[in-house]
Image (cartoon, rainbow, N blue to C red):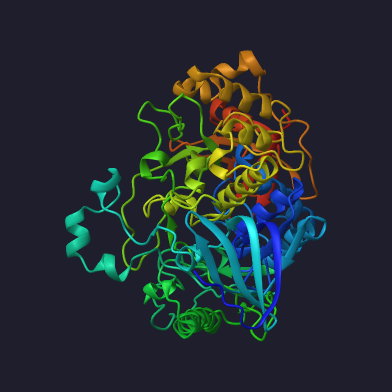
Amino acid sequence: MTVSANKIFSTTQVPLVVWGGGTGGVASAVQAARHGIRTLLLTPGAWLGGMISAAGVSAPDGHELSCWQTGLWGAFLQDIAKVEQDGLDQNWVSCFGFNPARAEVVLRSWVVDLPNLEWWSDVQLKSIFREGDRLVLLELELEGRQHQLRFDLFIDGSDLGDSFSLADISHRWGWESQELWNEPSAPSAKQLNSDPFFASQPVQSPTWVVMGQLDQHAQSPSSPGCLPRPFEAATKAFGFERTVTYGRLPGGLVMLNWPLHGNDWHKGLERIRSSDVKIKNQLAVEMQLYSLSFLQALQTVSEGWLNPGKVFPGINQSLALMPYWREGRRLKGQYTLVEGDLLPLASGAARGPIPLDKQGRCTSIAVGTYANDHHYPGKDWPLASKSCRWGGRWTGTPFCIPYGALLSSEVENILMADKAFSVSHIANGATRLQPMIFNLGQAAGMAAAIALKKRIQPAEVDISELQHELLHDIYAPAAIVPIWDWPAWHPHWRNAQKFVLAQPDCLSNHSLIEGFNLKANVGEMPLPDQTPLNKHVKKFSGCLRVHSDQTFSLDTKSKSWRLITLEPALNRWLESCEDQQNVHLLAVANPWGPWLRLIRVLD
């Protein structure tokens, strides 16, 4: 392919280029730079955090339990908790809620402290040139000037797999039939060919998030009027107040990302793949206007309780800087993660299978947890269950991401760091969330660092070395395999991970990996008594109620609270309690849950 030399302002050689704009993009760039690799991060917008900040999806789902708060996701939670003075217990869709602008501040603090990392924002990626099985050069525009970038290794950290079409990299788009991978939730080939729904809805519906602001001195309307079309059914399932506070954030901000007749966008999604800028811009305008209309509809009937929020730079400060893309192009990788890799084992283990190579070695490099969830117009698509009761609430069962899902089947010097990695359409519903993508991006950045230091290709990286480096990372050690019993804050957490990876029997015996027999090798898991406390933790006393549906509540003198926990030892304690037992607890109150999040037992 001939490279254009017209109006080239500069040509730069850099070991690692990360094309970002997604949460995994910044994670991979930070990880590689922290490990000594000179890295150039390119983002198409002014913010670098993707869905965690620029897209405004700042009430993340998944990875809420303390055993999954590892790696860069865990580091982000610790850092955002320091800057959100009102705390993160703010809504009922998630155990974490934060201002997306503050999330961006946290991520920028990571980037500016790294001498090996340079960030260029507001970049237009024009071309990617490929020679055989290697990507060799980018052409881009920055501040009206043309640049060429030569590189050794390229990471795609975009939501939509932007590099695939530019470099003619094999990828997937849309639904796959059940016959292809025997996925229980996939449609049959006959359905795919006969039902027009699959052509009109090739990918999950995106949302352009818009922010509202609650007047914290006013009350929610007691009898709100009906919303106008097309949003008239948006509040029917949960009522007006619960609909609005679904994504409540500190300071009374509300994230409006409402799937039930709300601002999910379902029309003309094929335009996501268009190379025509005008077509893409028209899609963006339609999505923005639709979300602003949803905000206005809610505001009109709120009787002054809800108004537009002010979060993002620009003329309309309530509107996110980019859409929340749930799905786009997906790589054809050396391994494709499918629904069978997500679902709990038939043997009764509350986790998916452990991926093994031909020698019986574990190939996992990150853990996912989200319950599979798809967004389309109309009724929910029926999906095989991967959830369980835990800690008084429903949570997603964990699964593993094999390293091969980050590697292309045909291009040797590319790694995937965001949701466009090699995954089926059905499985994408469980792999698209911020927490897992943080750690998937971290693994991509670590793999890039190892490959560049050893002057090998990503596919040649020893997976055992990659796992070791992730587990022993001095900044943000990351889990490799799903172990329910050991929280990330516990000093034995890493030993438990190492024990499981080193024991071939442990990888095939779910009772071992769930932690039952880890006690003899690692130690007993005590109730938390040394975990750090903050001003949001209060003492509660009352009568503990144990319910038949595996939920718990605490009857205090003033009210009855639902009781949940994110701590493994506290979950076991709750399960061992008798009904109507008097207890004294430390907990964080979430009035919008509404629940108490149990931190410590004082009895």
Nearer to us in this view, 279 or 201? 279
Which residue is rendered at x = 50% and y = 55% of the image? 432
Q: Toward the viewer: 265 or 537?
A: 265
User: What number of labels is visible?
Assistant: 0
Residue 145 visible at all? yes
Image location of residue 109, percent across then percent down: 79, 59
The residue lying at 43 percent from left, 54 percent from top is 429
Q: Is residue 112 left or right of residue 238?
A: right
Asked if residue 194 lies left or right of residue 254, the reply is left
> Residue placed farthest to the top in the image?
520
Above-or-below relation of 375 to 501: below
Residue that appears at 68% across and 35% down? 469
Q: Is residue 265 above or below residue 409?
A: below
427 up-or-down from 523: above or below: below
- Rendered location of residue 572, percent (x, y): 57, 28
In the shown orientation, is residue 339 left or right of residue 485?
Answer: left
Instruction: Answer whether residue 567 is visible to the viewer in this image.
Output: no
515 to 452, vertically: above or below: above
Q: Name which quarter of the figure residue 586 lies in.
A: top right
Q: Position of residue 473 (x, y in %)?
A: 72, 38
Q: Quadrant of the C terminus?
A: top right
